[in-house]
Image (cartoon, helix red, strand yellow):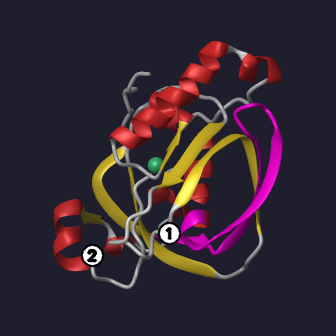
Amino acid sequence: MSILKVCRLGHPVLRQGTDPVSEEQIRDTLFQKFIDDMVETMREYDGVGLAAPQVHTPLQVAIAEVEDNPRYPEMPPLQLIVMINPRITILSEEVSFGFEGCLSIPDLRGKVPRAKKLKLEALDRQGKAYERTYEGFHARIIQHEYDHLIGRVYLDRMTDMTSLTFLREFNRYWSNAEVEQDIA
Ligand code: NI
């Protein structure tokens, strides 16, 4: 496995949108290795999610995982999920505001409104279709990663830029705030 280079805001691949993955491509050993590399990369950088455009690949692939960390009860663990050609359906009109960060926008955090509940339909890494509902922090991660696949980043979703903060200041002034945090 290898750790992939993560591109930063300004690289056009983050904005161009993505192509669906074909069944044939999913069976390709190089594609399977690519998913392994994405997982390795997300874990290396302590992310809770990663989308293919962030590693210079404009395909509809994203992953998410939250490891159990008792220090962050607001970040419940999530077993590794692989989302290929995902679709999301928002199931709740209720929105919550939570801090997000992004591996492609290093050193910043900002408060983003996200729907509280959604349905995810996608293919897993074997190409098998699945459908699941997610709420709260997990729904937030999935919306963040899905946005990457349509060329959006969390800054585009912020409705009030006054919460935008550098990480050092976040830890100093905001980290005990009522909100969740997220690096994806
Ligand atoms: Ni991101």
Disc 2/disc 1 C-alpha distance (Å): 17 Å
Q: Is residue 123 magenta?
A: yes
**Mark 2 CB in 8 Å range of ligand 1?**
no
- Residue closer to the observer: 2 or 49: 2
- Residue at (55, 33) in percent of width and height: 52
Q: Position of residue 78 (x, y in %)?
A: 55, 59
Q: Which residue is mark 1?
A: 76
Which amino acid is tagged 1?
Answer: Pro
- Residue closer to the observer: 155 or 87: 87
* Residue 151 can be seen in this image: no
Identify whether 165 is placed above or below 96: above
Q: Tell me which segment is drawn in magenta.
A: 112-138
Most distant residue in the bottom direction: 178
Element marked by disc 1: loop
Q: What is the count of numbered marks? A: 2
Q: Which residue is mark 2?
A: 175
Magenta highlight: main SS: strand
- Residue closer to the observer: 106 or 11: 106
- Residue at (44, 75) in percent of width and height: 74
Which amino acid is tagged 2?
Answer: Ser
Please state if 4 lies on the left or on the right of 136 as rendered: left
